[in-house]
Structure formats: C-alpha cells, structure tokens
Image (cartoon, helix red, strand yellow):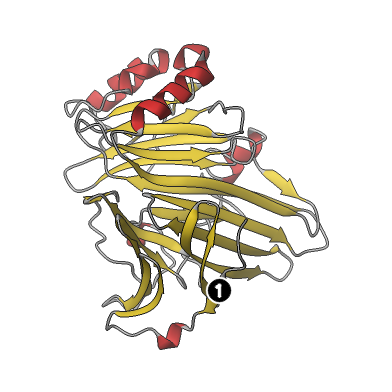
C-alpha cells in the first residue's frame, strides 16, 4: 500500500542556472537547473539513469537516458526554448499534445501544430517522493489551466513517476472540463526515441488483420522523394516491410503508421523497438484510453526520430480527424485520464514482453 508521499511545491523563480540537489529518496534524487535559454529544468535520477523534466514548460520530458544509453531523438534543437512554436522546440523525448486540437493543421484548420498544450506555461508544479508496493519513487507533476472567453476551459494535470530500480517512466495525464458545456478534445502522447539501424519492431497489433496502416499522404509542406513515394506504395499492401529498420530504406522526411493496438487481459498494449544488443525501447498504454497508435519514423541527414505514440486521434489535424469521428467529447466537469509507461527494457526482459505480445496476437 502506498504511503502518503511528501509533496514539494516548486517556484520557477527559485531555480537557478547552477545545478542544485533538492530532494533525495534512497537512490533517487532531484536536481534543479536552468538552461542557457532560461527554461527551468529538473533532473530526476536513480541508480540506472535519469530523465529531465521541464516543470513550467509543457511539463515535457526533455531528455531521458538509462543503462548508459540516451533514448531521445536526435534533433538540431539541442535545448528547450521559451517559445510556443512547436518546430522551434522540437527536441524532447515526450510532448503532451492537444487538447483543443492536435496534429498537423489542414487547409481548414486554424490551430497550431499539435495544439496549445505542447509548450503551455504551467503556473503550478511540484515534486513528490514516497514508497509503494513497487518501491521508492520520485514524481513530478503540475497543473495547467486553459481558459478562453467564449471557448474551452480545462485543467491539465500531467504526472511522471520514476522508481528506484527501474528504467521505465510511469506517466499519466488527467484533464477536466471546467466549462458548463461539453468540450471537444484530442490528446497525443508524442514519445520520441532514437532509431537504430537493424532495430526491429515487435508490438501487439497484426498487419495481416488490417491493424497497421501507412499514411499515404505527407503534409503539404513536405516534398517526398520518388524513392519514398514508391516505398509508401509498397507499405500500403505490406506494412510489415517496415518491421526492421534497414538504413537503406527511405524515411526522409518521414513515414507515419496508424496502429490498432490489441491489449492483454489487464488492458495494456505493448510496443518494442529491439536493438541489435538485445535491449529495447518500450511503450505500454491502454487502448481503452488511447485508441489510436501512431508510429512516426524520421531519418534524415539532420534529424532522426522514432515516434512510438498513442493518442485519441490520428495526426491529420482537427478537421480531418473530426470527419473520421475521432474528435472526442468531455461532458461538463468530466475527466479524461490516460496512463502509459515509456523507457528502456534490458535484454533479459525483452523475451518475456515478446511472449506477452505473441500471446495477445495468438
């Protein structure tokens, strides 16, 4: 049973450029610092690695590294910037996308790329530390209040917990509609790993049953090569051809897949990106909460990313997703909650997860 954790409320003005340890809980610790750009950050560490949280800037997980391996995508954006513009700040391990809209805006859309939540300014942030049946932990959370006259009004409460001996981050997002009228919403857990040559995908969906589909069209701002166009045509009928990351395959600028994940008896879906050394990047989520899986692969001379993502809708923007029936609605004072895990699993853990996936698909 979980003991009541100690909660420490954070003040952005008290975080300086000099790294300072502020909390310890067994082999867990938290240090505060500020990037040269001025963005405040927390480094939450355990015996196996760390992640960096931006408590007042989108509550993003800016970076993560465990067992000596950095997990985060490679981007020319090397540190977070105090901006609301998505592409100018696109270097994080995790973005919370939404809530009024999400994805790439289409010709009829007016929302920003991936919504207002991504780089939202949080006025409230905290740390907590305690122990439960899984062991000692430290977590970081906060609250963002979004209010627009004649528009939507909601609170968003993200949370990330790290245990003393784990290499996975336990993440949740809770959103409450504060209006007295229904609220449309979209949410995406935009999780960005670093792809590796010959990495292999093992996950709880079956391409042979139509549960994996490639996005056939790129956003209008992108210019695909003839090689990429030909490869996408192959993937329409044979999406399984992307299951091994052959460096010769064209992923410039990107290819996106939509995945209908299947869950185990406890309600969890599973996705692995297995490295040649046997370890793997791993995401697990509940399809009952996030019913649209997205795999985004980008391999260019300037940036590389593997998005192992889950959301309430696809990435085509509000209008296109609304036409598909993917924009969901929260009743007045109702809550949306999603929970997921992301991080690294070592080579000894991978066979057990692969068996669990095979059992789901059997």
Residue 280 occupies quadrant = top left
Please state which of residues 55 and 219 is positioned toward the viewer in this rendering: 55
Residue 114 shows in the view? no
Figure label count: 1
Residue 60 shows in the view? yes
Please state which of residues 277 and 316 is positioned toward the viewer in this rendering: 277
Residue 109, above or below 235: below
Residue 358, above or below 343: above
Q: Residue 195 appears at what percent x and percent y?
A: 26, 39
Q: Residue at image x 45%, y 17%?
A: 207
Q: Quadrant of the N terminus?
A: bottom right
Q: Residue at image x 30%, y 43%?
A: 305
What residue is shown with label 1? 6
Q: Residue at image x 39%, y 39%?
A: 282
Q: Residue 216 appears at what percent x and percent y?
A: 42, 26
Q: Residue 69 appears at what percent x and percent y?
A: 23, 49
Q: Residue at image x 58%, y 38%?
A: 286
Q: Residue 285 appears at what percent x and percent y?
A: 53, 39
Please state which of residues 26 and 17 is positioned toward the viewer in this rendering: 26
For mark 1, give the secondary structure: strand
């Amino acid at each position: 049973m979980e003991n009541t954790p100690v909660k420490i409320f954070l003040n952005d003005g008290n975080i300086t450029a000099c790294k300072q340890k502020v909390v310890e809980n067994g082999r867990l610790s938290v240090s505060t610092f500020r990037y040269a750009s001025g963005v405040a950050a927390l480094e939450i560490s355990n015996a196996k690695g760390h992640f960096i949280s931006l408590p007042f800037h989108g509550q993003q997980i800016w970076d993560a590294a465990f067992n000596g391996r950095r997990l985060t995508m490679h981007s020319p954006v090397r540190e977070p910037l105090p901006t609301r513009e998505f592409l100018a700040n696109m270097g994080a391990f995790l973005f919370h996308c939404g809530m009024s809209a999400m994805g790439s805006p289409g010709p009829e859309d007016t929302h920003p790329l991936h919504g207002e939540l991504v780089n939202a300014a949080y006025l409230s942030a905290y740390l907590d530390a305690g122990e439960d049946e899984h062991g000692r932990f430290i977590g970081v959370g906060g609250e963002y209040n979004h209010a627009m006259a004649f528009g939507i009004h909601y609170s968003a409460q993200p949370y990330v917990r790290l245990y003393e001996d784990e290499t996975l981050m336990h993440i949740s997002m809770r959103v409450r509609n504060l209006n007295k009228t229904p609220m449309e919403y979209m949410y995406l857990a935009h999780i960005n790993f670093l792809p590796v040559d010959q990495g292999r995908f093992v996950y709880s969906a079956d391409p042979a049953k139509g549960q994996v589909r490639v996005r056939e069209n790129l956003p209008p701002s992108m210019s695909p090569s003839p090689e990429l166009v030909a490869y996408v045509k192959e993937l329409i009928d044979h999406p399984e051809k992307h299951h091994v990351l052959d460096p010769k395959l064209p992923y410039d600028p990107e290819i996106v897949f939509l995945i209908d994940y299947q869950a185990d008896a406890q309600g969890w879906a599973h996705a692995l990106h297995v490295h040649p050394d046997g370890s793997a990047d791993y995401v697990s989520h509940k399809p009952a909460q996030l019913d649209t899986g997205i795999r985004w692969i980008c391999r260019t001379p300037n940036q590389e990313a593997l998005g192992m993502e889950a959301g309430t809708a696809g990435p085509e923007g509000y209008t296109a997703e609304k036409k598909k029936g993917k924009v969901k609605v929260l009743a007045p004072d109702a809550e949306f909650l999603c929970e997921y895990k992301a991080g690294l699993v070592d080579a000894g853990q991978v066979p057990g997860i692969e068996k669990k996936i095979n059992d789901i698909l059997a």
